[in-house]
Amino acid sequence: MSRERTSTWVRLTATGAGRIGLAASAGALVLTTLPGRAELGDEATGAHGGRALPRSRRPDRLTQRPGSATPPTDVKAILDAAERDLVAYYAAWPEHPGRRIGDLWRGLLDLPVDLEGLTTFSRSVLELLRQVPPGEVVTYGLLAARAGSPRAARAVGSVMAGNPLPIVLPCHRVVASDGSLGGFAGESEAEALEFKGRLLSYEGWVGGG
């Protein structure tokens, strides 16, 4: 059965940690980028008709043409909320904001997310991420067990690598069983893991490996 095609709208915004990208369609947020992985470009539009951001291949960067059209009211409301909450989340960067981090995280929990098109396992794993509070971590294996597949730690790693909504769905809080950081998406493994560590420190985690 074919589904009605919808438009996805992109917004770039500055935060205390750098520029981020957001994308939303009617009803939910569909994509966020980490700081530094959003840029202006001439080849992209602000409103991507017909799921131009496919679920199976989420882009590592978002681009947007300046002066793109205004999104519908419901989509604008989601982008406004996501921008407000993520700007607030990064406001103290890079210094740990203390107990306020809990309030900042609760703001992100209220954001509606769209995981349509992902497998049941992937959806379950990503939804479980929201149960891991800032300042705490979970291992790939434990997350797999919570999702009902205790031997699927590697599969969990693949889900984390394709997470379309970093920070909102906090894949940076997933670490290896030995306490090391495991993996993280980025152009350079070393830089990616360094940023993952900074995110965890920002949230108050004092572990490491």
Image (cartoon, rainbow, N blue to C red):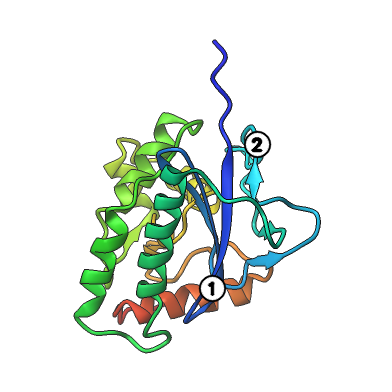
Image quadrant occupied by the N terminus: top right
Locate residue 129, reporting x and y percent: 33, 52
Tell me the quarter of the picture where residue 113 sits.
top left
Q: Is residue 170 visible?
A: no
Q: Position of residue 81 (x, y in %)?
A: 37, 58
x, y percent for residue 140: 39, 54
Q: Nearer the viewer, residue 209 or 172?
A: 172
Please, what is the three-letter code of the amino acid marked with disc 1? Leu
Residue for badge 2: 49
Precedes in sequence: disc 1 or disc 2 = 2
Seen as rendered, the residue at the extreme bottom is 95
Where, by quadrant of the figure, is residue 184 drawn? bottom right
Q: Which mark is residue 4?
A: none
- Above or below, 133 relative to 161: below
Question: The C terminus appears in which quarter of the rendering?
Answer: bottom left
- The residue at 51%/31% (across/down) is 117
Q: Are marks 1 and 2 in contact (CB under 8 Å)?
A: no
Q: Residue at x 28, y 84 (%)?
A: 97
Residue drawn 67% across the image and 71% down it: 188
- Find numbered disc 1 in the image and state the secondary structure of the residue it sits on: helix
Residue at left offset 54%, top offset 19%: 3
Callout 2 secondary element: loop
Towards the viewer: 77 or 130: 77
Q: CA distance from mark 1 to mark 2?
A: 34 Å
What amino acid does circle 2 point to? Gly
Left or right: 139 in relation to 192: left
Residue that mark 1 sits on: 193
